[in-house]
């Protein structure tokens, strides 16, 4: 399944997964008109420095100025998005999300719970088969690998791997970029640590990751604070485990104050896919569909790449010569990604259950 996706991260490797058909399709005039009549799109959990979302949202608003974008709780996790849809089933007001951007494991969960409506964008054929629901209820949008970002003003020696973080040198310095009971990014950070121990992806690696973070917490190295660019700069979380695209975006934002290192660990190199979906109860379903059309257009996909994310249509766009070389040059060396492991959906689900169910009892750190 998603293991077939591994080699996608090597930019020098021939692209073999996605369709190579060119995508010139535009949303229908009827859809555009219907979306304009609705006049609003409500998003949730889209921080502007995540995957270049600030520029993506600005691009959508520029293209469709008649549609205002109502942004809910930018720092929410995937589980929070699920709950927001559930809680607003009968609410057509501004607190009801139209669309979600969640970790891979949450897509099938939301479909099973009847929380999503199906919709296939014009460029559907260029989204790899193994990261989309055949019926169109959810579809992969972008991917990256787990990394570590380090505040060099406070950390003398940059860690190279997961085992390094257990050293006394890193006392009170290591944080996750989310609550591992709710945040997909944090849940998969635990999985990556488990993979680094040699455990098999899924339940086994989830449990091994919990054991690792229990040791990290017992050693006094783990900080139960959600790591962000601000906490990194302030020094409350000098080392943050985060997706590479977030870490690289934070590095740009901080602009050397403080100086930071972004590293892909030597082992436990975990790649993760996020997926899009439209709420089954969306107050603005046509605006939601138009938003998806924009995200999966050449413009939307390129904007994500500018935010250091590998967009779902990367293969087809690369083959068609649609990706600016300057954007490719800004990405970390392809060699750093060659060990990347893409867990299957089943492995992601098993890990999620192990981590969310066992964090409190095994690690016992209340991340907030």
Image (cartoon, helix red, strand yellow):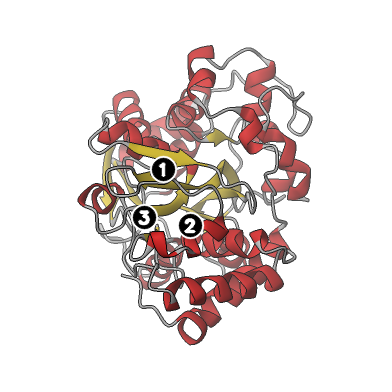
Q: Are marks 1 and 2 in contact (CB under 8 Å)?
A: yes
| First-in-chain label (1 vs 2) | 2
Quadrant in the picture for residue 283: bottom left
Query: Where is 222 relative to 138, above or below?
Result: below
Name the one closer to the observer, 34 or 359: 359
For mark 2, give the secondary structure.
helix
What is the C-alpha distance between the residues marked 3 and 1? 30 Å
Q: Quadrant of the C terminus?
A: bottom left
Under circle 3, the secondary element is loop
Q: Which residue is mark 3?
A: 283
Depth check, mark 3 against mark 1: the one in front is 1
User: Does 309 sit above or below residue 316?
Assistant: below
Neighbours of disc 1 within 10 Å: few (<14), some (14-19), many (20+): many
Asked whether residue 105 appears in the rendered view, the answer is: no
- Residue 104 position within the rendered picture, expressed as x and y whole percent measured from the top left: 59, 56
Residue 184 locus on image (x, y percent): 50, 60
Asked whether 96 or 324 is in front, the reply is: 324
User: Which badge, 3 or 1, comes first in the chain's sequence?
Assistant: 1
Q: Is residue 185 left or right of residue 322?
A: left
Q: Residue at x 58, y 27 (%)?
A: 333
Relative to 307, residue 194 above or below: below
CA neighbours of label 3 inside 10 A, class few (<14), some (14 to 19), many (20+)? many
Q: Which residue in the structure is indicated by mark 2?
A: 185
Mark earlier in primary sequence (2, 3): 2
Residue at 34%, 24% (x, y): give it. 63
Please give the label number shown on residue 162. none
Q: Residues within 10 Å of mark 2 (few under 14, many from 20)?
A: many
Residue 172 in the image, given as x and y percentages of width and height: 33, 65
**347 and 68: which one is in front?**
347
Instruction: Say if mark 2 contacts mark 3, CB within 8 Å.
Output: no
Report the residue marked by disc 1: 246
């Amino acid at each position: 399944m998603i293991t077939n996706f591994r080699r996608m991260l090597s930019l020098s490797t021939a692209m073999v997964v996605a369709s190579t058909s060119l995508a010139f399709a535009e949303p229908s005039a009827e859809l555009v008109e219907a979306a304009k009549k609705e006049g609003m799109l409500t998003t949730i959990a889209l921080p502007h420095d995540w995957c270049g979302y600030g520029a993506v949202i600005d691009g959508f608003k520029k293209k469709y100025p008649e549609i205002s974008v109502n942004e809910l709780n930018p720092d929410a996790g995937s589980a929070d998005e699920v709950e927001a849809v559930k809680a607003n089933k009968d609410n057509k007001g501004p607190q009801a999300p139209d669309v979600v951007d969640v970790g891979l494991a949450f897509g099938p969960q939301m479909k099973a719970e009847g929380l999503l409506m199906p919709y296939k964008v014009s460029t559907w054929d260029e989204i790899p088969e193994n990261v989309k629901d055949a019926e169109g209820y959810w579809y992969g949008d972008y991917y990256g690998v787990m990394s570590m970002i380090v505040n060099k003003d406070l950390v003398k020696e940059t860690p190279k791997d997961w085992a390094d973080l257990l050293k006394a040198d890193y006392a009170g310095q290591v944080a996750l970029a989310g609550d591992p009971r709710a945040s997909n990014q944090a849940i998969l950070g635990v999985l990556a640590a488990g993979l680094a121990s040699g455990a098999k992806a899924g339940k086994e690696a989830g449990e091994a990751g919990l054991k690792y973070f229990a040791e990290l917490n017992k050693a006094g190295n783990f900080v139960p604070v959600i790591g962000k660019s601000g906490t990194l700069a302030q020094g409350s979380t000098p080392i943050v485990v985060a997706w590479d695209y977030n870490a690289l975006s934070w590095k740009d934002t901080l602009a050397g104050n403080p100086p930071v290192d972004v590293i892909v660990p030597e082992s436990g190199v975990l790649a993760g896919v996020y997926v899009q979906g439209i709420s089954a109860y969306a107050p603005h379903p046509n605006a939601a569909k138009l938003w998806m059309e924009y995200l999966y257009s050449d413009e939307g996909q390129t904007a994500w790449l500018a935010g250091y994310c590998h967009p779902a249509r990367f293969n087809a766009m690369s083959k068609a010569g649609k990706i600016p070389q300057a954007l490719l040059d800004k990405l970390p060396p392809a060699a750093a990604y060659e060990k990347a492991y893409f867990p299957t959906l089943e492995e992601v689900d098993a890990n999620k259950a192990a981590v969310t169910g066992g964090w409190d009892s095994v690690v016992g750190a209340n991340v907030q």
